[in-house]
Image (cartoon, rainbow, N blue to C red):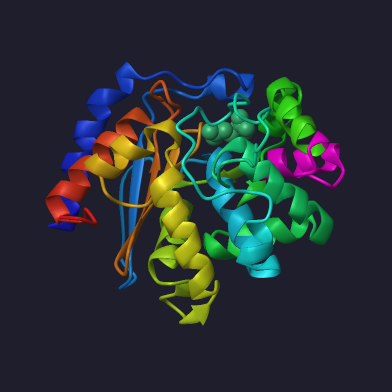
Amino acid sequence: MLNRVLNTAFEIGKEKTELGTVATYIPELGKADKNDLGVCISTQYGMTLCAGQCEKRFTIQSISKIINFAVALEKLGAEKVFERVGMEPSGDAFNSLMKLEKADSTPHNPMVNAGAMVICGYLTEICTFEEMLQHARRWCMDEEIYMDEDVYASEMANLSRNRAIAYLLHSKGYITADVEKTLDLYVKMCSLSVTAKSLANLGLVLACKGVDPKTNEVLLQPETVKIVNTIMFTCGMYDGAGEFALRVGIPSKSGVGGGIISVVKGTMGIGIYGPALDAKGNSIAGIEILEYVSKNLNLHMFE
Ligand code: GLN
């Protein structure tokens, strides 16, 4: 049953890849093949189902915001974290600067660039990139995750907009750490090379209240997971979050590398790789696939 739904969803998604475009504002991402597609489902009973390119590596991009956010919550606690970043959807593009200049300009949430930079500012002062990489490897159950040097260099060389955001936040006291170090950590985390399978594994940990269902090891505190999943549900798909919540109804987070991670409470993690994006920077095939899977397996939170 699960396999049949997955394979049909994959075929439906495959027809859509042609309609999207790969991200080019980070030139290295422009080299992706827009027809690539992979879906992986990882279940609480230890089953892993794959369709298409589940083992192909791509950069995690904004999905790293979940890892950054989780580490910050675990190390600093929610009260401290939310001193400098909000918990409301922005309704704006992920890299928007528009509202940051206003009087009360707290970045909307940790899932948009500005909010993620606040989180990276905190992290810069308390841990190293190496430590962050170890968290990513452990939580994704993928020891082969590495930082893609080419994508990192490409983003660093085209960072004007994110630099503008970070310096604006620094001028207003939302970032107190060294701005360049903060940006470096932010971009390094975006450049982690993952697979649809590693995302499905991370999704499963988030679906199981932070416990690795294979070993019963506690990887994240339940309170951290509750907060991360909630913010993912309301803000994870940027200015497409509302429509996505209605169509799919599963907490999810996208990245411009083409990845989507989805968390089905208590049951499964879903990881997708489909670099053809829609206008909001979300994988066009990925959304179709998740809509089909959600409908056919009854996974919508409010259905
Ligand atoms: N590295 C990208 C950026 O900051 C991540 C954006 C995304 O995946 N939406 O622009």
Give the camera-side residue of 277 and 161. Answer: 161
Query: Where are the magenta residues, as a range?
Result: 171-190
Kindly identify the residue that appears in the image at 48 percent across and 74 percent down.
Answer: 222
Q: Residue furthest right?
A: 178
SS assignment for the magenta stretch, majority: helix
Kindly identify the residue that appears in the image at 42 percent across and 57 percent down.
Answer: 230
| The magenta stretch spans residue 35 | no
Quarter of the rendering containing residue 111: top right
Position of residue 246 measured from the top left corner of the image (x, y, whole percent): 24, 42
Give the camera-side residue of 144 and 185. Answer: 185
| The magenta stretch spans residue 185 | yes
Position of residue 240 measured from the top left corner of the image (x, y, whole percent): 38, 33
Q: Residue furthest front?
A: 103
Which quadrant holds the C terminus?
bottom left
Give the camera-side residue of 127 and 232. Answer: 232
Ligand 1 position by quadrant: top right
Residue 249 in view:
yes
Kindly identify the residue that appears in the image at 54 percent across and 74 percent down.
Answer: 221
Left or right of residue 78: residue 213: left
Kindly identify the residue that appears in the image at 51 percent across and 80 percent down.
Answer: 217
Position of residue 254 measured from the top left corner of the image (x, y, whole percent): 45, 40
Residue 252 in view:
no
Left or right of residue 136: residue 171: right
Left or right of residue 154: residue 234: left
Above or below, comparing residue 68 to residue 245 in the picture: below
